[in-house]
Amino acid sequence: MGSSKDDSGTDGENSGGDLPDSNSSLFSEGEKVLAYHGPRIYEAKFVRAM
């Protein structure tokens, strides 16, 4: 049982294998996203990254 606990640290390091390039964003233009503003969450459209 102790060995599975030791292996969990190495699994976490490999979990992000499909990360986007530094120039790309998490969303694509025109994609529908959830926006949070104060107490409200609403549907919005992603226009561009700053």
Image (cartoon, grey):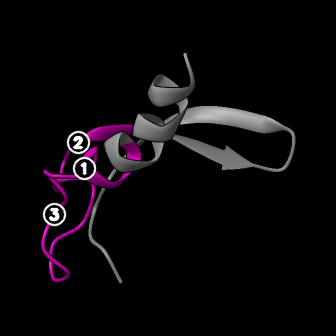
Q: Which mark is residue 20?
A: 3
Q: Quadrant of residue 24?
A: bottom left
Relative placement, left or right, of 32 versus 44 is left
Q: Which mark is residue 14?
A: 1
Q: Is residue 8 above or below residue 12?
A: above
Q: Which mark is residue 40?
A: none
Crowd around label 3: few <14 · some 14–19 · many ≥20 (10 Å): few
| Residue at the (15%, 52%) spot, across then down | 17
Q: CA distance from mark 3 to mark 1?
A: 15 Å
Do residues under tags 3 and 1 come within 8 Å of each other at their CB atoms? no
Crowd around label 2: few <14 · some 14–19 · many ≥20 (10 Å): few
Mark before the other along the chain sequence, 2 or 1: 1
Q: Nearer the viewer, mark 2 or mark 1?
A: 1
- Amino acid carrying label 1: it is Asn
Mark before the other along the chain sequence, 3 or 1: 1
Do residues under tags 2 and 3 come within 8 Å of each other at their CB atoms? no
